[in-house]
Image (spheres, rainbow, N blue to C red):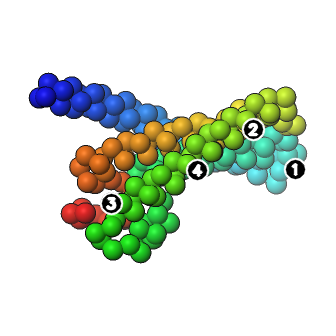
Amino acid sequence: MEEQTTGIRKAMAAVRAVEGTITLIVEAAGVGLLLIMVVVVSIGVFTRYVLINPVPWSEEAARFILIWAGFLGAAVAVRKGSHYGILTLLNRFPRCFRKVALLGIAVGMATFMFIMVRMGMNLTMMAAVQISPALELRMSWVYLAIPVSGVLMVFYLVLDVIDLLTTGRAALGRDPTAHQEDGD
């Protein structure tokens, strides 16, 4: 029995290491995309208003970058428990029912995320024949942000539910602005 527990702990430590690496990559990609977007928008503004000769691709590139950054940011928000609507909903429950409420919220979120992944994949496949006008980029690359983000969200949510069931604590439903941990 002790060997099995040790094995589970080692497996969870390995999963947490992978999760940390994935989160670092996703956060770095999000920051990088936002920095690139600032540069692209600046180029667009400069060429439009200073050179009076706008580049046609800047608006489209900024839009696509914002889509990817937004979806990656939503996944990181699931990881950090930063969806305030969940906290607001959770605070309506008495303290004794919060763990059950969190599990119910997690089931609802997972349902939405699975639909998001499935529909995102369908959109991605349908958009494979569309080409963006300015960048001449396959639109499937833009739509791919939806299922990628959905898979990341499911991954983070599953780990959070495991934390909730094993330790009684989870990022989901915790006030991300609070600096102290409460004993929930």
Mark 3: amino acid: Lys
Cα distance in 3D space between marks 3 and 2: 35 Å
Marks 3 and 1: CB-CB under 8 Å?
no
Q: Of tags 2 and 1, which is closer to the observer?
A: 2
Q: Which residue is mark 4?
A: 112
Sequence-wise first label, 3 or 1: 1
Marks 2 and 1: CB-CB under 8 Å?
no
Compared to residue 123, the image places residue 78 above or below, namely below
Q: Of tags 4 and 2, which is closer to the observer?
A: 4
User: Measuring 59% from the left and 36% from the top, which residue is drawn there?
Assistant: 148
> How crowded is the residue under tag 2: few (<14 C-alpha within 10 Å), some, or many (20+)?
some
What x and y, as percent, mark residue 98?
Answer: 34, 65
Sequence-wise first label, 4 or 1: 1
What x and y, as percent, mark residue 119?
Answer: 69, 41
Compared to residue 162, the image places residue 21 above or below, namely above
Q: Which residue is mark 2?
A: 123
Quarter of image, res 1: top left
SS of the residue at dot 1?
A: loop
Mark 4: amino acid: Phe
User: Can you tell which mark lies on residue 99?
Assistant: 3
Q: Which residue is mark 1?
A: 52
SS of the residue at dot 2?
A: helix
Cα distance in 3D space between marks 3 and 4: 20 Å
Sequence-wise first label, 3 or 4: 3
Sequence-wise first label, 3 or 2: 3
Q: Of tags 4 and 1, which is closer to the observer?
A: 4
Quarter of image, res 169: bottom left
Compared to residue 171, the image places residue 130 above or below, namely above
> How crowded is the residue under tag 4: few (<14 C-alpha within 10 Å), some, or many (20+)?
some
Cα distance in 3D space between marks 3 and 1: 59 Å
> How crowded is the residue under tag 3: few (<14 C-alpha within 10 Å), some, or many (20+)?
some
Cα distance in 3D space between marks 2 and 1: 37 Å
